[in-house]
Amino acid sequence: MRAASTTVFRNLIRVFGVLPLFGLATVSSVFADSITKSFEIGSGTPQLRSHVRTFPVPCGLEVVPIVKVRRLGADGSQHDIPIKIELRAPDTALGQEGPIIETKSANAKKTEQSFTLARQPRSARGCSLPWRVRVKHDDDGPAPSPTFGTIRFDFNGALRGISLQYDSYALGVMRKGTSIQFKVGKFLGLEQGIIDITANWRHILATDLVTGPNPVRLKWELINPNGTVVKTITAYSSNEARNELPKFKLVYQVTSCVVGQWKLRVTNNTNDDAAVDYKKAELVPGCPN
C-alpha cells in the first residue's frame, strides 16, 4: 500500500510540476528578486511530519515570505491536513535557528492555497545566517496524505546606484603625486552583493581648463569600513579610446555585513595632472555562490 501511495504521489507531482526534493535544495538565481524552494510532508515523502527550508538573503533587505500548499488524497474537507507554518528570524549563529517571529495555522486542501506572511524588516545578519520556514503537520505523527508546495522569499534584488562623494574639496583634480578619496555609499555600509565602479578622467594642463594629450594611469583602491584595502585596480580612464590600454573597471563582491563607511582612494603616480569628470558605482544585491 505504501509503495502504491508513493507511486501515485510522484506521478501527480510530475503532472503538477513540483518535484520531490529528497533533501536537495532548489534555489533560484543568486541575484534574482526571489528565492523559491519546495517542501513536502506526509505519507510517501521523505519528511513525514515536518520540513524546514533555509533562505539566505543579503543583509539590509526587507523580505516577504509566501507559502503555497496543497494535499493529495481523497475528496472532502474531512480529509484536509492541519498544518502549521513557522517563520524564524535569521539564524543567531551558524546552524542555530533564530526565534519564531510568525506562525500561521491552516488546513491543506486538494486545491492549492497561498499564504503571505508579514513583511519582515531588514536584517543585518546576511547570507551566512539564513531565514527559516518550517511547514509541519499540526498534529501528532506524520501527515496522513502527501502534502507539498513551495516557499518563496521576495526581496528587492534590483540593481541600484551607490553614491560616490568626495571626501574633501579636491573636486576630482588629481595633481601628480597626490591622492583623493571618495565616500562609497552611506555610513551604515553596503548591502551584500557585487559592486561595479567605473570613472572617466582626462589629462589637464596647468590652467585646469585645457585638456592635455596624454593618457593618465591612476591607481584606485576600495577600502572597507575596517580600513582594509580589499581591491586595487591600476588602469586608464573607463572611456579610454586606445584599445591597447587597460580601462578602469572595479568589480568587487561584498560578502559580509560590515557596518561603517566604505571608501575609494585614487592615487596619481604619473607626471601628469588629471581631472575626474565622471564616476558611477552600482550594486546588485546577492549572496556569494
Image (cartoon, rainbow, N blue to C red):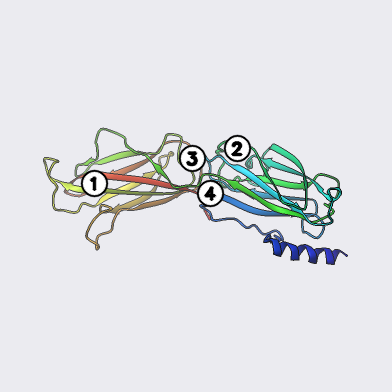
Mark 3 vs mark 2, foreground winner is 2
Residue hosting label 3: 258
Q: Do the residues labelled 4 and 1 touch (CB within 8 Å)?
A: no
Of the 4 image quadrants, the one containing the N terminus is: bottom right
Residue occupied by mark 2: 120
Q: Is residue 241 above or below residue 171?
A: below
Q: Which of marks 4 and 1 is in front?
A: 4
- CA gap, disc 2 and disc 1: 46 Å
**Type of the residue with mark 4:** Asp
Q: Which of pointers 3 and 4 lies earlier in the amino acid sequence?
A: 4
- For the residues bearing labels 1 and 3, Cβ distance under 8 angstroms: no
Kind of residue at badge 3: Val
Disc 4 on helix, strand or loop? loop
Q: Is mark 3 on a helix, strand or loop?
A: loop
Residue 142 or 251: which is nearer the viewer? Answer: 142
N-terminal label among 4 and 2: 4
Q: Which mark is in front, 3 or 4?
A: 4
Farthest residue toward the front? 76
Total labels: the figure holds 4
**Mark 4 or mark 1: which comes first in sequence?**
4
| Residue at the farthest right position | 1
Give 27 or 17, whichever is nearer the viewer: 17
Circle 1 is placed at which residue position? 268
Q: Real-space Cα distance between discs 4 and 1?
A: 40 Å
User: Secondary structure beneath disc 1?
Assistant: loop
Would you place residue 193 above or below residue 167 in this image? below
Q: Tag 1 or tag 2, which sits nearer the N-term?
A: 2
- Do labels 4 and 2 touch, CB within 8 Å? no
* 243 relative to 135 in the view: left or right: left
| Circle 2 or circle 1, nearest the eye | 2
